[in-house]
Image (tube, helix red, strand yellow):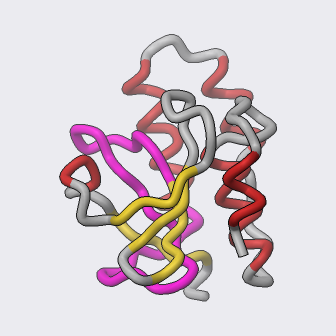
């Protein structure tokens, strides 16, 4: 279901963590916002922590936190209490995500210590 996505290189605004998440949700029959307005706002903010706070505010205002992951749900990896990265839970303790550091989307296990502080969100209680 996701193998074709693993071949698309990272490019901000074309294949980044938000675009990938939207596509994965679309494949599950869910239309979720991409937050274009937030992208425009964060591009004008220099402080990384301010950008993180703005994105987290948007997620928390439109998504419902859940305690246990379900397919599909948003996986948020916070950094010191702020948003740092997102992906989508795809089952079997795995999630799909993409970052500028990895260059391509990857599927990883959630038990990686890098993701220990992860949070889960479902869109509009779906």
Q: Position of residue 120 (x, y in %)?
A: 40, 70
Q: Which residues are magenta?
A: 61-86
Q: Residue at x 49, y 72 (%)?
A: 89
Q: Position of residue 3 (x, y in %)?
A: 70, 64
**Residue 16 magenta-highlighted:** no
Above or below, 74 relative to 105: below
Residue 48 vs residue 37, the one in the foreground = 48
Apparent side of residue 85 relative to residue 113 in the rendered image (left or right): right
The residue furthest top is 46
Above or below, 9 relative to 73: above
Q: Position of residue 38 (x, y in %)?
A: 67, 38
Residue 35 vs residue 96, the one in the foreground = 96
Above or below, 89 relative to 46: below
Corner quadrant of residue 84: top left
Apparent side of residue 67 relative to residue 9 in the rendered image (left or right): left
The reply to whether residue 76 is in sight is yes
Residue 13 vs residue 41, the one in the foreground = 13
Identify the image quadrant of the N terminus.
bottom right
From the image, give the main secondary structure of the stretch colored magenta. Answer: strand
Q: Residue at x 53, y 76 (%)?
A: 90
Residue 25 vs residue 82, the one in the foreground = 25
Identify the image quadrant of the C terminus.
bottom right
Apparent side of residue 18 relative to residue 27 in the rendered image (left or right): left
The reply to whether residue 117 is in sight is no
Q: Residue at x 67, y 27 (%)?
A: 41
Q: Residue at x 50, y 52 (%)?
A: 86
Q: Position of residue 116 (x, y in %)?
A: 21, 57
Above or below, 30 relative to 100: below
Corner quadrant of residue 119: bottom left
**Residue 76 magenta-highlighted:** yes
């Amino acid at each position: 279901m996701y193998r074709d996505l693993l071949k698309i290189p990272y490019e901000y605004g074309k294949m980044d963590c938000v675009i990938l998440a939207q596509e994965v949700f679309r494949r599950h029959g869910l239309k979720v916002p991409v937050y274009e307005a937030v992208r425009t706002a964060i591009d004008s903010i220099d402080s990384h922590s301010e950008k993180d706070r703005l994105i987290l505010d948007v997620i928390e205002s439109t998504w419902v936190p859940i305690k246990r992951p379900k397919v599909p749900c948003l996986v948020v990896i916070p950094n010191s209490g702020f948003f740092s990265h997102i992906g989508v839970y795809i089952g079997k303790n795995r999630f799909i995500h993409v970052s500028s550091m990895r260059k391509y989307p990857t599927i990883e296990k959630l038990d990686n210590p890098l993701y220990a502080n992860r949070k889960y969100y479902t869109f509009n209680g779906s």
